[in-house]
Image: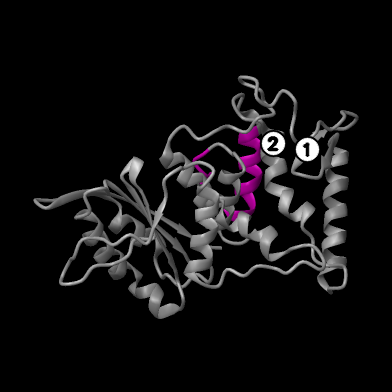
Amino acid sequence: MGSHATLDALFLAAGAPGPPPALSHSAKWKTWLLQAGNDPNVDSLAVLGNVIEEFMDLGPDESTTEFESWSRKRQRLVKVLEEHGFRYYRGGRVLPAGELAPPIVSESANKKNDPAEPRKPTSVHELILTLVRGLPRAMHPLTHRRKGAASLSFQSEYDIQDLLHALLRPWVADIRPEEFTPSYAGSSTRMDFLLPAYKLVLELKLIRDHTHGRKVGNELIIDIEHYRRHPECDTLWCIVYDPNNFIPNPQGLAGDLEGKRSTTDGAIEVRVLILAP
C-alpha cells in the first residue's frame, strides 16, 4: 500500500475512524480495520469495500505482464472474503454471503440516516479535507482506463488543479480560479482557487524534484504573505502533492506553516496537507 501517508489517506478517504493507529505499516491496516469493526458508528464493510475497490475493479490490461499477478492476488482476496462469510461486488460493496447486492443507487438512498448513503461533509473544511485526501484515488481510474480509452496524465500542477476543480464544482457554486492577490515585496501572484462565500483560498503545489522539495516551504511563506493581505481570504489551504517523496521532512514543513498569522495589515489561518505515496 506504499508509505504511511498513502495508507492513512486511503483509509481516511474510505471512511475509517481516525486518528491512524501509531503502529508499524503491516500492523496498522489490520488494527484500523478492527477498530472500524468495533465502532458502532462506522459501517465497517463499507470501509473495507472502499479500501479494496480500486484493486478489485481496476486491474491492469489483460495484455500486460502485470495482469496475471494481479489476477492471482484478486482471486486470493476473493477466497479470503468467502472464508469469512463475505462476498465482493463491483463498486466497493462487501456483503455477507447469500445477501443480494442492492443497486449502486438505492431507492432509499435519500432517506434520513439511511446506512446506504455515504456520510456528507458537515463543513467546507471537511469537504476539502475529504476531496484532497481522495485525489490519488480519483486519479487512479483516470490513469488506468478501460482498454481502448485514452488514459489521462497528472504530470503538472494544472492537471491536478483541474481535477480538484472538477471535484469541487458539484459542492461549491462560486469557485474563482487564478485571481490576483495584493502586492507583497513588489509583486503579486495568482491564487489557484478562491471560494469567496467561505473566504477561503486553495493553493496547490506539485513537487517537481529534490530542489523544489527543499524550497517549497519558502514558496509557501511568500504565498501566505500575499494571501494574508487579500480582503476575501481568511483561510488558506496549502495542498502539496509530492508523489516522489522529494520533501525531506513533510511533517516539519506542515508544522512550521500551519496556524494563525496576524499583523496590522491582515490575518490568515493556514492549513497544510501534504500528499505523498
**Label 1: how many residues lie within 10 Å, few (<14), some (14-19) or many (20+)?**
many
Left or right? Give the position of 180 relative to 54. Answer: left
Q: Main secondary structure of the magenta part?
A: helix
159 shown above or below 4: below
Residue visible at 84% across and 36% down in the picture: 84
Q: Which residue does the image show at 76% across and 39% down from the upper left?
A: 93
Residue range of the region highlighted in magenta in the rendering: 18-36
Q: Quadrant of residue 120?
A: top right
The picture places residue 50, in percent across and down from the top left corner, at: 68, 44
Compute the Cα span from label 2 to label 1. 7 Å
Q: Which mark is residue 116?
A: none
For the point 39% across and 60% down, the residue is 192
Question: Is 35 on the left or on the right of 240, as rendered?
Answer: right
Outermost residue, top direction? 112
As for residue 194 lying within the magenta part, the answer is no
Q: Which residue is identified by label 1?
A: 94
- Decide which of 96, 173 is in the foreground and name it: 173
Q: Which residue position is annotated with label 2?
A: 46
Q: Viewed as shown, does residue 82 lie left or right of 41? A: right
Q: Is residue 261 visible?
A: no
Residue kind at label 2, given as amino acid type: Ala
Q: Cβ–Cβ below 8 Å for labels 2 and 1?
A: yes
Residue 29: image location, x then y, percent: 63, 47
Residue 57, x across and y down, in percent:
78, 53
